[in-house]
Image (tube, grey):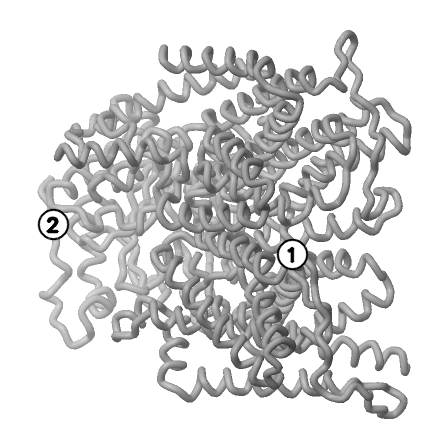
Amino acid sequence: MRTKLVVGAALALAAWLLPYGLDSYAIHVVNVILIFAVLAVGLGLCMGVAGQVNLAQVAFFGVGAYATAILTTHSGLGFWVSGVLALAATVLVGLVVGTPALRVQSHYLGIVTLGLALAFTNWVTNAQISGGAEGISAIPVPTLPGVDLSNEYLYYYLELIVFVLALAFGLFVVRTGLGRRLRAMRDDSLAAGALGAEVPLLRMTAFLLASVYGGVAGVLYAGLIRYVAPESFGIANMFLLLGMVIIGGRQSLIGCVVGAVSLYLVREWLSDHPTIAQLAYGAVVVLVVVFAPTGLAGLPARFRDLLRRRRGRSGTAARLAPFRPYTEPAEPSTGTGAPILAISRVTMRFRGLKALDDVSLTVGRGEIRGVVGPNGSGKTTLFNVISGLYRPTGGRVEFLGTDLTGSSPYRLARAGMSRTFQNLRLFGDLTVEENILVALDRSRTLGAWRYLLGPIAVLRQDRDLHRRARDVLDQYGLTEFAGLAPKSLPYGIQRRVEIARAVAAAPSLLLLDEPAAGLNGEEVRQLSEIVRSIRDSGITVIIIEHNMGLVMSLCERITVLASGRIIAEGEPAEVASTPAVIEAYLGDSMDSDDLPSIPEVTK
Amino acid sequence: MQIFLQTIIGGVSLGAVYALVALGFSLVYRTMGLVNFAHGNVVTVGAYLASTFYLSSKLPFALAMLVAIAVTGLIGLIIERVLRPLENRDFDLMLIGTIGFGIVLDALVIMIWGATGRAVPSPVPAAPIDLFGVRIRTYDLVVLAIAAAATILLVLFLSRTKRGAAMQAVAMDHEAATAVGIHVGRSNAIAFMIGAGLAALAGGLVGPLLYVSPALGGTLGIKGFAAAILGGFGSIPGAIVGGLAIGILDSFTAGHFQGYSELVTFLVFTVIIMVRPTGIFGERTVNRA
């Protein structure tokens, strides 16, 4: 912390003194670099943090610059008024460019945003109002009482302040709830949705942020160069910008800034040989992507890892602590009363295949319900229908008395449903603690305006979340893993993290999809203890499991699926002796003595 | 009516070129789930190579084209080999990697051939054929014939040869393909090579139609991509239908919106993606991302 402060202060001082050592050309270069740095931070937020491929950042930049130019020269508005309006226009364009993200991702999104960026350059080169290929010159100098902003040395300070604010705001977003949710969505949008992250809204937020940064950079550019022309906002600059973000390290905003500064300096240094510069940075982009995907920003960590391995200290000494059961049993559990979940006549068809066929199921409050069945019998499909990942072809899903058939996963999650996944869906680039934090954070994405108007409240809330996350980690015995990446942990611990995360979302219904898969005997015993304690704290649990011993000992009622139909339902012993179940599991010629073996698990 | 027909005819030959570009995109995508953003630049390289051998070395047009295809095929192999460590791991990074290659190729083109473009004369007599009052350039017919032949060869390769069948298997399930002993990397490399060859074919053919310049591939690339999406990404009939459709759309927008034709094409394309991301024939798209 102290070193950070010292470094920060030194950097601030250096930035303040920088103009004194530069000639007029150099300060111009620095000014342009700062603009690119703002752009790169915006692109980093959208692409690196939120995972939304955005090849239209340069168009946002262009809209900001052109709008300022048009409003000042054609409409005769003042520079700052135009700037604010231009920013608004950019945000509008950003939201339009972002809408395809609601439907498509990755490559498709890349090409659509690229296409829209090309459409923008096509428009400005042809439209009368934007001055065609010649562009618009004679943009008035921005006015500031007492400061002559036509002086590039003074303009530098203006830019510096804007840049620092922009970077600080970006870092603030990344390190608090909103950024965590964006990163969670980047790592696994399905799991993020199942934890209540409003994925569509978050994707738009990513583009909103990118466009704000693009717009700010555009206004600054218009004020600095006072001339705009189509080629400044063309595809070549888009790729240059992309190179900056990738080489610097897209997931780190500081990395984006470093990338912007270094790439621009190299380009400036090779300014007599622009094609060589282009060749060089293109090649570096390829090399970085293959050999150092985290970019320059990721190098220190890789270096440290390497050093540690050299010294022969691989892995961590962190140990799993025992689970501490929930103390206060909420309301009296094992309840009757209104069912928490009522599924009636649900059918799910995938083209020709009927994965679920007329399935009806009621789960009472406080129950632990087991769902078993042979592979391919539709268990996970049932979970996906319940948790909103699939919209059923027919039938109704009622949760807490309301019909929520076909609701999006995040709505269901916010209504109080939480789940784990068969193949583990932890957020890979977040730490264990952050995984928990994403689940704990129930604030709405629409409440993100508080980032602008009430940053203190955001910070306070975040501190509170951290405290609660520590409690959760402690309860699940995961404290020592808090700062580690989930991928580095043994499988059994990852499973426990996922359960802790699902429960941290404070659900009233918890869906566990094969939580014992891949666990050893001792871990299965712990799991059964954990699940029971979760139920005793007032959460209803539905569990899909192949480990019959676990299911038989844990569940009060069991539902058996086979080929998409419910073939039996009842208490464990009762179900285990149903002929249809035995047939489904063992084939019809078998004797009823060969039941799925009853308790292997010690209590 | 005559103008209408003439506009369609005008769009068809460019449409065939778009279809070839789209085929390259689709072939790589269906095999490895990757969109090759350097594809447009490979088109540029192909166009320059073909025109150089045709104009400077005085090779016959067909031979010049073959040489161009061979060289770009090699480029495709290199791209695939370098990016192979990322295959089936991180698609966003691979996408950016191909953009990096695009930047490199773009720089190389400018270094070798300069930033200014060149016009390529038509290799066949220029007198257009008059058919019921509609004028058809003979070269357009050549383009259509070659594009059709290339498509048929590709389909035959995919359906009749062992290597082609292996590629289809990789497209469906790369893990299962590995399990039965198919070398997935090699299959991807061949897809990339053929894709790049198709790009060169498109670039070589388009030379006499458009002006060959470093910016050529960018436009062709994105239009070819639009065509692939419109038809249904990864689908071969889709690429052809999409290519012709975009070509015709292009020729209408060029007539009605002049300078804004590109803008209109991209907006239409965005709306199509929004409404139906899987395109017309998009049943069997692979999405491993």
- Say which residue label 1 marks: B274
Quadrant of the image containing the C terminus of chain A: top left
Quadrant of the image containing the N terminus of chain A: top left
- Point out which mark residue A367 bears: none
On screen, residue A126 above or below B59? above
Position of A178 with respect to B264 (left or right) is left
Label 1 environment density (alpha carbons within 10 Å; few <14, some 14–19, many ≥20): some
- The percent position of residue B193, horizontal first and vertical second, equals 45, 72
The answer to which image quadrant residue B198 occupies is: bottom right
Q: Secondary structure at mark 2?
A: loop
- The percent position of residue A187, horizontal first and vertical second, equals 42, 43
Tally of marks: 2
Q: Residue at x 83, y 25 (%)?
A: A140
On screen, residue A559 above or below B248? above
The answer to which image quadrant residue A531 occupies is: top left
- Point out which mark residue A599 bears: 2
On screen, residue A103 above or below A8? below
Q: Determine the chain carrying the residue at label 1.
A: B
Q: Residue at x 53, y 60 (%)?
A: B38
Q: Residue at x 68, y 39 (%)?
A: A60
- Amino acid residing under circle 1: Met
On screen, residue B224 above or below A185? below
Could you tell me if residue A450 is visible in this image?
no
